[in-house]
Image (cartoon, rainbow, N blue to C red):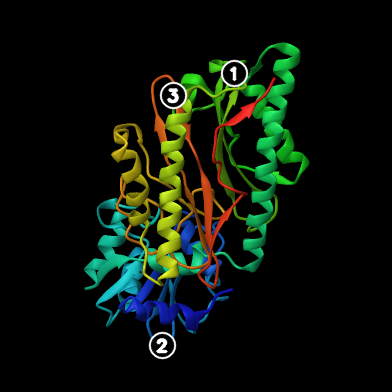
């Protein structure tokens, strides 16, 4: 629900004169989510929310009612490009600093949804532009009560999916001596379908050296068998197949046999210790009511792996925001690929998923963390994996 008072309070809190929302043909998903404007519109629209006062609208004559559902009686209709440019100037008249879906130097591409030319146009009107990243967090990345419930429901089912996959591996090896990665992937997808889950992409099932590729693409062309003595990594993500549901996303590792080789166990315990350091960082900050930013959690997690001498083998950020997309639009747990300065705020969820990726094998342990409305920290999807799972055959 669009809450003008809450949005204007947030604009004043970050010290801006207003928030200028803009879209063209669905390019700015964030503006669509905040305003509820449909992506099918064919012409450019602007909606300016001042820190105080009445919002203003700029729409094309072909789609004059595009923003009528939003607060604000002041509407300018343009036809010619000259009228568009003049209309933008009228929207931001008197404002010195406005927020847009922009990230300086494209440091955070999840926020950078407004093209450079439009940024130039707004700046030519005498405004400086700052990122709307923290505004987006509050009004697009937070989960409401219903979405919170969809996450916990998906989390429970995803946890069951691992048990189904590991049991399937054991059964197939007992009867056939081996099972292909793609067969396990197909079994997980069948479980998702049977239990009302959907996903944008099938899970990763990676054995041996494939597990050393963080974004391995499980497919027939590269299929390897899982058999006795195999280390297998499964990364799966899914959400309830209903509107506005949010994802759950987890990674677990297993070994086919009675005794896990020491090399695998050693690397796993380093990764698990890093994961737990990240979780502890979040718990401590919220217990102390201390502001916490995404890069800080990445730093706490990454330090454990670096101190163990494997820093060069942890090749990605520690985690990502989770929302209606598995990689959502709130604060990421990232001090590596970007320095995410956005605060971790209540009603947002994110992954913590450190990994060590060696040529012969890789280990990753992924959990989801959710901060509820009261600032309580939840690690979802069951207890974090404490040991490599043993698949007994």
Q: Which callout, 3 or 1, points at the residue further toward the start of the chain? A: 1
Q: Which of 275 and 245 is in front in this view?
A: 275
Q: Which circle marks residue 31 in the picture? A: none
- Where residue 44 sits, quadrant-wise, is bottom left
Q: Residue at x 25, y 52 (%)?
A: 105
The answer for how far apart the CA atoms under marks 1 and 2 are is: 59 Å
User: Which structural element holds mark 2?
Assistant: loop
Mark 1 sits on what residue?
220
Mark 2 sits on what residue?
53
Q: Which callout, 1 or 2, points at the residue further toward the start of the chain? A: 2
Q: Nearer the viewer, residue 80 or 218?
A: 218
x and y, in percent, of residue 124 in the image: 22, 68
Q: Which circle marks residue 263 in the picture? A: 3
User: Which structural element holds mark 3?
Assistant: helix
> Eyeballing the image, is 362 above or below 300?
above
> Eyeballing the image, is 187 above or below 12?
above
Question: From the viewer's perspective, is 299 left or right of 168?
Answer: left
Q: Residue at x 46, y 56 (%)?
A: 329
Q: Comparing marks 1 and 2, which lies closer to the viewer?
A: 1
x and y, in percent, of residue 312 in the image: 29, 33
User: Which structural element holds mark 1?
Assistant: helix
The answer for how far apart the CA atoms under marks 3 and 2 are is: 63 Å
- Where residue 52 sits, quadrant-wise, is bottom left
- Tell me the quadrant of the picture where the C terminus can be found: top right
> Eyeballing the image, is 352 above or below 343?
above
Number of on-image labels: 3
- Tell me the quadrant of the picture where the N terminus can be found: bottom right
Estimate how packed mark 1 is, as few (under 14), some (14 to 19) or many (20 or more) residues with alpha carbons within 10 Å.
few
């Amino acid at each position: 629900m669009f809450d003008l008072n809450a949005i204007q309070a947030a604009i004043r809190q970050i010290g801006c004169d207003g928030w200028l929302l803009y879209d063209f043909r669905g390019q700015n998903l964030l503006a669509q989510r905040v305003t509820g404007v449909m992506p099918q519109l064919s012409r450019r629209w602007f909606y300016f929310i001042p820190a105080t006062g009445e919002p203003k609208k700029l729409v094309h004559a072909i789609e004059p009612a595009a923003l009528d559902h939003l607060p604000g009686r002041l509407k300018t209709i343009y036809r010619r490009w000259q009228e568009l440019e003049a209309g933008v100037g009228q929207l931001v008249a008197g404002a010195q600093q406005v927020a847009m879906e922009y990230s300086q130097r494209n440091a955070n591409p999840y926020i950078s949804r407004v093209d450079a030319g439009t940024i130039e146009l707004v700046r030519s009107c005498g405004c400086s532009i700052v990122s709307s990243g923290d505004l987006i967090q509050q009004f697009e990345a937070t989960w409401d009560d219903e979405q919170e419930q969809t996450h916990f429901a998906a989390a429970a089912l995803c946890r069951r999916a691992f048990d189904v996959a590991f049991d399937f591996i054991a059964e197939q090896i007992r009867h056939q001596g081996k099972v292909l990665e793609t067969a396990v992937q197909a079994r997980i997808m069948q479980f998702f379908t049977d239990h009302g889950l959907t996903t944008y992409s099938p899970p990763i099932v990676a054995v041996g050296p494939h597990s050393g590729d963080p974004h391995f693409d499980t497919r027939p062309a590269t299929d390897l068998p899982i058999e006795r003595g195999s280390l297998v990594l499964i990364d799966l993500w899914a959400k309830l197949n209903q509107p506005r549901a949010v994802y759950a996303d987890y990674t677990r590792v297993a070994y086919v046999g009675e005794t896990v080789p020491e090399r695998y166990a050693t690397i796993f315990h380093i990764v698990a210790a890093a994961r737990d350091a990240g979780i502890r960082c979040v718990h401590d900050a919220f217990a102390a009511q201390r502001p916490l930013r995404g890069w800080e959690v990445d730093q706490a997690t990454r330090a454990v792996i670096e101190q163990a001498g494997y820093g060069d083998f942890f090749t990605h950020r520690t985690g990502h925001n989770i929302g209606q997309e598995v990689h959502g639009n709130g604060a990421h747990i990232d001090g590596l690929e970007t320095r995410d300065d956005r605060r971790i705020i209540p009603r947002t969820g994110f992954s913590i998923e450190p990994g060590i990726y060696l040529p012969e094998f890789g280990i990753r342990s992924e959990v989801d963390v959710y901060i509820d409305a009261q600032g309580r920290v939840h690690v979802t999807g069951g207890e974090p994996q404490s040991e490599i799972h043993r698949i007994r055959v």
